[in-house]
Image (spheres, rainbow, N blue to C red):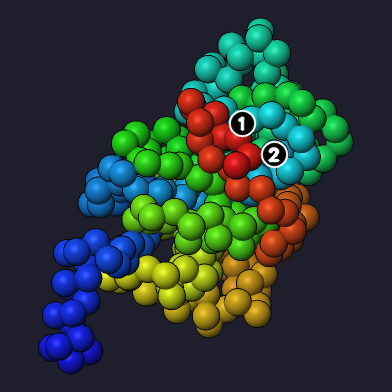
Amino acid sequence: MDLITTTLNIEKYVLGLQQMPKSLEVVLSPALLSEVDIVGKNVVVIDILRATSTICTALHHGALGVKPVTHAEEAALLKDIGYITAAERNGEKLPGFDMGNSPFECMDGKVKDKYIALTTTNGTKCIEMTDGAANVLSGSFLNISSLANWLIDSPNDIILFCAGWKDKVNMEDTLFAGALALKLKSFVEIDCDSAQMAMQIYRNNSDRIIDFLKDSSHYKRLSRLHHEEDMIYCFQEDIMDCVPVLKNGILVAY
Ligand code: MLT
């Protein structure tokens, strides 16, 4: 861009004639969240296997809202006020709760017109780390285009926050961050190596997602637990249009 055009563009920004392009950053692990400023930004929490995929599925199947909690004891207490309780650790359902964290547990009608208290190994903890954000959203392949359109329509900067696995980077959340960033790249400014890497990973593997992820730690973990069908389900794109947004501590369909 030549100097004259650049100067004119800056003048338009200064005069408020043109909105400063919003930024997009990718955070690959909760351990890196402190490296970015989330205040006033739209934060998309990403836990493809399976928390944010299950959250989208529950709302799509009529749940009134999903309250993410970090500790299982918090979820258990909410049963007394009519919540469906869902708890998972290390991929397995915790005993004594109504559900684990499989999206298929949301499809038999039990969650319709109910609130769900959900605690998982990583995803729900990440949602509770987002104080100060303008909006907190739940991202999955299942609702990727509706989510992208919501973010495009909002003026706020964007943080794509990968839950990973116990502070380690994981492949599936990074892959999704790349897919979403590619849908947004024409509408944002991306000055973030994590985002560039994530987009390149998705570009190179979008037509072979299952094969690409078969070497991932979470795919192996969930396969050992016979949750292969959960993973096939969670990698489907655009099968629902709900956009989960956090309101008063509860994720509801926007
Ligand atoms: C997580 O919180 O990391 C996942 O939701 C765990 C799982 O469902 O296997």
Whole-angstrom CA distance, mark 2 to mark 1, is: 8 Å
Residue at horizontal 55%, vertical 60%? 149
Q: Residue at x 76, y 35 (%)?
A: 62
Disc 2 residue type?
A: Leu
Residue type highlighted by circle 1: Val
Left/right placement of residue 225 relative to residue 68 reads right
Q: Which residue is mark 2?
A: 59
- The residue drawn where x is 20% and y is 86% is 5
**Quarter the N terminus occupies:** bottom left
Q: Position of residue 51 (x, y in %)?
A: 59, 43
Q: In the image, is residue 124 above or below residue 27? A: above
| Tag 2 near tag 1, CB within 8 Å | yes
Label 1 residue SS: strand
Residue 194 occupies which quadrant of the picture?
bottom left
Q: Nearer the viewer, residue 38 or 31?
A: 38
Quarter occupied by the C terminus? top right
Disc 1 within 8 angstroms of ligand 1 (CB)? no
- Which label was assigned to residue 66? 1
